[in-house]
Amino acid sequence: MKILITATSFMDKMNNEAIDEITRFADEIVLNPFKRPMTADELIEMSEGCDGIIAGLDHYDSRFFEAAPASVKVISRYGVGYDRVDIAAARNRGIIVTNTPGVNSESVADLAFGLMLAVARNISQADREIREGGWPRFKGVELYGKSLGILGLGSIGKAVALRAVGFSMRVSASDPYIDVKYADEHNIRVCSFDEIVTGSDFISVHLPLNESTTGIIGSEVIAGMKKDAIVINTARGGIVDEKAMYEALKSGRLGGYGVDAYAVEPPVNEPLLTLPNVVATPHSGSHTREATRKMASLSVRNLIDVLSGKFCGFEVR
């Protein structure tokens, strides 16, 4: 077996157990030499003769699948999201795609809540200014007693909700497939999308990126938000219209934006990053020791199961 590993953090020493497992399974391992997500042309060339790919944040579009070597049988996502993989094109080629749902829920929830606190209390700006010799005074806002609207009550959204309860926030959630039983058990108010965006002091986005969610938080939706509302996006950049968000933040219409995901990554000359009421992180929601180890382990297990002809419960359909 020959395996291509494109995920740039997979070979970290903290993943020793997963590395050992894939090394025992494969006859040859090919690593991403670019230290960044690979292009379609690079993927096509590097996957020559490979049976499977442990995939990072590369884009596996229709062009890749049209030219992918016949040997490739599985793309095992080292992560939860698979919006960068053309699932229909993969299916047409008979290539199985898997992912690792649930393994990074706690780490992403931690970051979402960290961004919420950082924006609400101007933590990043205060840190910068005091390092430059200043002694700033900012009037932040408390999370205590505020309303938090969660868009997408999957495993990450649920974990954010539990953290919010600890801060005595009033939690509401919108999800087309909402777990009503879970919401009832944890005193989470089930709301429509419109109720969330118009009635929440804080809004945390945990939606998948697809045709129905691309640009869903645009100028009209943002205009309907509470004045000084704070938005947190640790999901996908394409869900938020970044130009509309920039205009709302610059004008003072919104209170702030905590962002971990961007339409273009890494962002280049992004106006949002010039604003003091934006706290930005580099798509690092899953970058904890615990989540990394779990992602590595499950992505390897998925790949081996598929290539060994075993049932894989994490196939994307």
Image: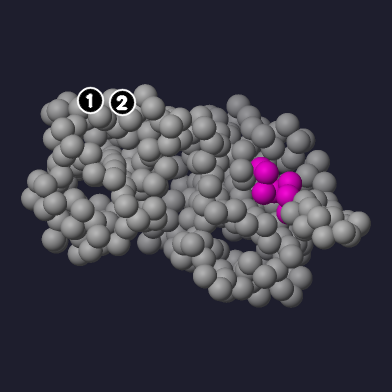
Q: Residue at point 79% right, 53% down?
A: 127
Residue identifier under label 2 = 20
| Segment colored magenta | 113-120
Tell me, yes or no, whether the highlighted magenta stretch contains residue 177.
no
Mark yes or no: residue 314 visible. yes
Residue 63 image point, x, y percent: 20, 64
Q: Is residue 55 above or below residue 42?
A: above
Q: Secondary structure at mark 1?
A: helix
Q: Residue at point 21% right, 53% down?
A: 46
Residue closer to the observer: 70 or 313: 70
Mark number, residue 206? none
Q: Are marks 2 and 1 in contact (CB under 8 Å)?
A: yes
Q: Residue at point 14% right, 61% down?
A: 66
Residue identifier under label 1 = 24
Could you tell me how far apart the alpha carbons at marks 2 and 1 are, in whole angstroms? 6 Å
Residue closer to the observer: 108 or 29: 29
Q: Is residue 25 above or below residue 288?
A: above
Q: Is residue 102 above or below residue 151?
A: above
Which amino acid does the dot numbered 2 rest on? Asp
Residue 315 image point, x, y percent: 26, 38
